[in-house]
Amino acid sequence: MKLRLARQSLSNAVVVAVEGELDLFTAPFLRDEIRDAIRDDGPTLVLDLGALSFMDSSGLSVLIEAWRLATSEGGGVSLASPQPPVARILRTTGLDRRIKVYPDVDTAILQHPE
């Protein structure tokens, strides 16, 4: 499955929905979308991972880069709804201790990502 991205700008955050597989070949598309979202809509970002079925180390690198960019701009990144395989990677690598993970997008938005 290819990667599909959808962006929605809200009053206090921008949500980027990520669907499909995030790997070496698709990671640059998400990287560009995140940069554009932060530039156009502000540095408070929620990544909706509910439809992300696979993520490798390239995807992890994009998440770390997103966190660094958003925090350097005074915002933050939250992850929402990761499926079990993706949640396992976040836990195993410890990234879930750096970037907050929420059960759904609404909760992530309400918590105002740091």
Image: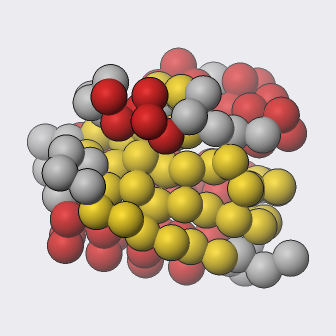
Which residue is rendered at x = 54% and y = 27% of the image?
A: 102
Q: Residue at x 28, y 62 (%)?
A: 9
Q: Position of residue 54 (x, y in %)?
A: 82, 55
Which residue is pictured at 74% across the width and 32% down the height?
87
Residue 110 location (% of width, % of height): 32, 28
Q: Is residue 47 left or right of residue 11?
A: right
Placement of 48 over or under 79, stated as above or below: below
Instruction: Indicate the quadrant containing the N terminus: top left, top right, bottom left or bottom right.
Output: bottom right
- Residue 23 quadrant: bottom right
Q: Residue at x 19, y 73 (%)?
A: 40
Q: Position of residue 72 (x, y in %)?
A: 19, 46
Q: Residue furthest left?
A: 74
* Left or right, residue 102 beside residue 77: right
Q: Quadrant of the C terminus?
A: top left
Can you say whether 60 is above or below 110 in the image?
below
Position of residue 67 measured from the top left corner of the image (x, y, whole percent)? 38, 44
Which residue reaches farthest top?
97
